Amino acid sequence: MFSDFSTAELMAIFAMQGFAGLILFAVFILMALGLAIIFGQMGVINMAHGEFMILGAYVTYLTSTLFSTHAPDLFGAYFFFAIVFAFFAAALLGALVEWSMIRFLYHRPLDTLLATWGLSLILQQAYRSIFGAREVGVVIPDWLMGSYQLTDMIEVPINGIFVMCLALAATVFVITLMYRSRWGMQVRAVVQNRQMAGAVGINSAKVDRMTFALGCGIAGVAGSAFTMIGSTGPSSGQLYIVDTFLVVVFGGAGSLLGTVASAFSISQSQSILEFFMGGSMAKVLTLLIVVMILMFRPQGLFSLKVRR
Amino acid sequence: MMPFNHMKDYLTRQEALSFAVLALVLLVLLPLSLDVMRLNQVGKYLSFAFVAVGLVLCWGYGGILSLGQGIFYGLGGYAMAMYLKLEASSPQNTLIQTTPGIPDFMDWNRITELPWFWEPFYSLTFAIIAIVVLPSIVAYLIGVAMFKRRVGGVYFAIITQSIAAILTILIIGQQGLTGGINGITDLRTLKGWDIHTDVANYVFYFLCVFLLFVCLLIAQFIKKSKTGRILIAMRGQEDRVRFSGYDIANFKTFVFVVGAAFSGIGGAMFTLQEGFMSPSFVGVVPSIEMVIFCAVGGRLSLVGAVYGALLVNIAKTTFGETFPELWLFAMGLIFIGIVLGLPNGLAGVYSTWLAPKVDEMLNRLLGHEKQNQEIYTSIPIVKQGVVS
């Protein structure tokens, strides 16, 4: 399949597709970071994660309409407010869900899956009732429009670069939080041994709630980023949930670095293969390879050793 | 070589009663009270009951949650549909096509020759064998690959879910070979016999009920045999069973294959009764819905699973038609409520509240006092160990 192209063309294709893949990588990483915290650290399968992301997207949409009607001068900066709002809206809902539902199910991980699936149905219908079934899009501020011409064959969209920076910043933030803060230490202690963590005075119920809320909050930020590259509908989130779970499992649950690596490899292979064999086959092949690798290496790329 | 000494080792009185009531409902009550169209709908719902019964074995007894039962349902359904489609696209029927004798969607996609994997489906015998064997082989491969490496629990659920997603994308993407998102439609006859007449609908309904009871009895046999005991032990304390010298992976693979074969039959019955098969019964969402049928009915009750499939589907159609908005809220709340409040589903409600009364009544009716005490409460769900 490579023989039809000259070397220079191939390089340009790889660069362009690779860059398009980076945007996918950004969405994957933001979605997967939240999920890696919730699933990897807590063992809860959150099937409603996509709906938390869409909540963030709708909050971004609301913020953008709010700014364009009431403060058109500040419209260029609305996105930064939207990220903060999206984070807190999703985190708040996450904390509520943890309090009302998840905390009763920690010893039954498979059941969290069913309960959160029910939650995702409710949320989807709620979005449909509130925002309507039609997809909404945000107006992207001027400074994020356009693209940057790298060479005459390669050009790079600016909103892509922005979304990527956002994803990287979020990753650095989460990794710092988990490995360099006191709170992160408590979370890791609870993951490794809940009883012992409780015995040394960590309030594990509170840590659980905060962890779940943080994971959902990051999904909200993912939703903000998502509005840059796609339009938001009530069930848009569902399209990403399977990929995101695979990203987390492939990276090795409990390893944030593994999540980054697997999000990168999955998004890149998908994007580059897409050029040569079309979208659906590229996705099939990528997912198939991942599933195959997981069958031979079930613990994922990087695995955290946990004493059971 | 009878594995059971007494009939009651195979079927306790309560279980016999529940099977009898189910038979009464499905064979007498529903056919007499519903018109042909409604009965055909019930038949379609029952095709999901096959999957739910398989899930009782896999999930309720074996503790293996598969989110990919749609794969097997789809394989069975597509095997049946491919046979029917080939019959419907005989050269006489498809004279107007550029290439007569191939399915219409292939012609639309400019395919001029029947793909190799369609060829064997000219034979009905092959198709019937494929309905059971194809899902079994796929389940066996997945099972061996996963269980031998001690992958279980949450990981197994996610990987089966991914495979269901892959299969759906593949079917939708390869429109020329599979019919794409519309699926395989416009199926007409089975061996020259119109499948859309009222008579055909009745025949398929009773065939469906008959096969469902065959599956139920096989499942009951497995549940009461030594394998069933080991499955329960495994679900509770996998390591102890392993240390006792049993090969866990084989038992898990076995029960997963049985569940897959049941699902395949269900899929084929769906195709026969609905007259088409499409990827919308294969993917992630339908697969989770199948788990929910099982959860609502009660993950430990075979008969409960059938009621679960029926009730959820009936509710979905009736409420879904009248209050489409409220229905999704209601459905979501039902799932959450069942998982939080009734982990043993409707069957759990029956066995705690009604079963003792029914038993007392039976004793009085049959005129014997407190004979063979039965254990009403189903086996409590043991904590499923957190997998690392």
Image: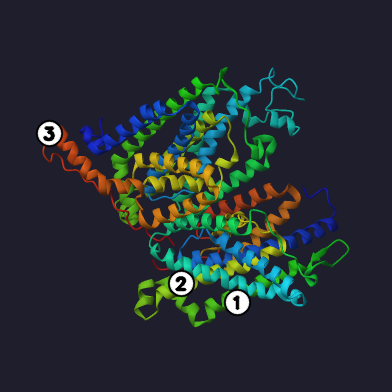
Dot 2: element = helix
Q: Is residue B85 left or right of residue A275?
A: left
Q: Please state the chain letter of the residue tagged with numbered disc 2 in the rendered image.
A: A
- Image quadrant where residue A290 sits: bottom right
Q: Which mark is residue B347?
A: none
Q: Is residue B359 left or right of residue B173?
A: left
Residue tagged by mark 3? B367
Q: CA gap, disc 1 to disc 2? A: 19 Å
Q: Please state the chain letter of the residue tagged with numbered disc 1 in the rendered image.
A: A
Residue tagged by mark 1? A173
Residue B244 visible in image: yes
Q: Are marks 1 and 3 on the same chain?
A: no
Q: Is residue A130 left or right of residue B261?
A: right
| Three-letter residue code for mark 3 | Gly
Q: CA gap, disc 3 to disc 2? A: 57 Å
| Three-letter residue code for mark 2 | Arg
Please provide percent x and percent y for residue B31: 41, 27
Residue shown at 43% from the left, 52% from the top: B334
Dot 3: element = loop
Locate the C terminus of chain A by quadrant: bottom left
Residue tagged by mark 2? A209
Residue shown at 44% from the left, 26% from the top: B207
- Image quadrant where residue B253 sits: top left
Please provide percent x and percent y for residue A96: 47, 68
User: Residue most toward the left?
Assistant: B369
Please provide percent x and percent y for residue B271: 54, 31
Instruction: State which mark lies toward you, 1 or 3.
Output: 3
Crowding near pointer 1: few (<14 within 10 Å), some, many (20+)? few
